[in-house]
Image (cartoon, grey):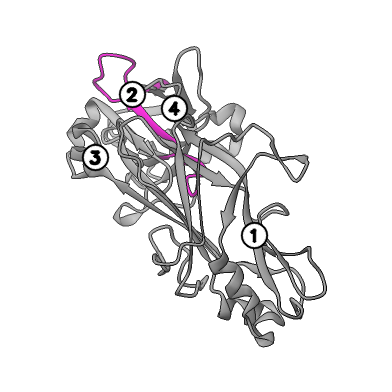
Amino acid sequence: MYDPIFGITNAKFYSQLNTTTTSVRFGTNPVFDSAFLYLPYKSTYGDTLTNMTLHVYPLTESIYDSIHSYSNKSVAYDHDHQLGEITFQPRPHDSAYFNNTTQIPMVRVPINSYFGNAMLAADTTSLNDNAGFVKYFKGICIVSDQQETPGKGAIISFNAPSSYSVLRMYYHNSSDTSLNYTFAIATGCQRFQNYSHDYTTAIPQLRQQLQGDSTLGQQFLFAQGMSGAKIRINFPFISKWASKDKILINDAQLILGNASVSPVFTNPTQLALRGVGEGGSTSPFTTIDESEGTSYFDGVYNENSQTYRFRLTRYIQQILQGKVNTHGLHLLIPSASYVGTRLVLNGTKSPQTNLKLYIRYTKLN
């Protein structure tokens, strides 16, 4: 995906395959006929009218869950022996039709004989169970061609594992002319995603903020999913306010204005706030106001005003009382581990809807 503001984002998917039965046997003189990898849609983000090309490669390195748990990790795959390729336009809401029946929306990638011949040549030890199979065939990597045109391309997430995320191989042998066997991206498969954001292709305001120029937050603020950017918000003067008067916070609302309304690169329907820990890390804990529920805490996009709102009444009171740290808050896109959504907000001195903290309070004698 080549976002005209955020630049180029690439995603890869790595996964083991599992056998669906134990003690797999393909019979006497098996011959590969064809195979297809089925990938049911979960979501898409970006320009789905752009053609996309996916490539499937065999892994040459094993996936270990203890190592490959983060989206900046990768494993080696065999570029010289592609297993399959498809060029298509994403259609996440259109049913697929093949095998004389209507299927759920999915991508069906043709898989070639390199895979099929490797399966049919496997020894019995490799086909007795999944432990032996993943040693023999380490898995697959799905890679897309990079998009080079600003505004084009999309990020697709697939529903895997599921009962539909399978690789089905068709073959025949000396005794039967029509056989098939199904390998699955199943719950027991080790799998992970890899994301890369080329922010050198982003607009200057975003690049300069990522390089440390926080003054540009007066104009615009940027957040992106898939291990991309997040927004840090500080309230540097509130604690000093309490040194002058005793203050009771009746209501505190953080108002955020959407600065990039786009029918293609749509903004998230809801945002999340987390505390900032020591060293700038994101705390796993929510603010105290979130415990009051979404209807109070909010964070949901208002299409009429094109704004987000968070109620922070109890949190601001805690700052005044010295009960929370003063490192600020991180504004995040929910489900950012797999969602490619991005967000541009107006800054504190934007000519449009400013970022505001609205406080209604009472001075106590």
- The quadrant of the image that shows the C terminus is top left
Looking at the rendered structure, the secondary structure element under dot 3 is helix
Q: Are marks 3 and 4 in contact (CB under 8 Å)?
A: no
Which numbered tag is attached to residue 355? 2
Q: Position of residue 267 (x, y in %)?
A: 45, 28
The mark that comes first in sequence, 1 or 3, is 1
The kind of secondary structure element at disc 2 is loop
What is the magenta range?
A: 331-360
How packed mark 1 is, by other alpha carbons closer than 10 Å (few <14, some 14-19, many 20 or more), is some
Could you tell me which residue is drawn at 75 percent across and 79 percent down? 25
User: Which badge, 3 or 4, is on the more N-terminal residue?
Assistant: 3
The residue mark sitting in front, 1 or 3, is 1
Q: Residue at x 38, y 32 (%)?
A: 152
| Secondary structure of residue under mark 4 | strand
Disc 2 from disc 4: Cα separation: 23 Å
Amino acid type of the residue that numbered disc 3 sits on in the rendered structure: Thr
**In this rendering, position of residue 36 left or right of residue 308:** right
Earlier sequence position, callout 1 versus callout 4:
1
Q: CA distance from mark 1 to mark 2?
A: 57 Å
- Identify the disc placed on residue 3: none
Of the image marks 1 and 2, the number of the one nearer the N terminus: 1
Residue 264 in the image: state x and y as whole percent: 44, 25
Spatial CA span between label 3 and label 4: 47 Å
Residue at 47 percent of width and 24 percent of height: 309
Secondary structure state at the residue bearing disc 1:
strand
Q: Position of residue 227 (x, y in %)?
A: 40, 49
Q: Nearer the viewer, residue 189 or 93?
A: 93
Q: Which residue is mark 1?
A: 34
Is 295 left or right of 164, judged from the image as shown?
left
Query: How many neighbours does mark 3 have within 10 angstroms: few (below 14), some (14-19), or many (20 or more)?
Result: some
For residue 242, say whether it is visible: no
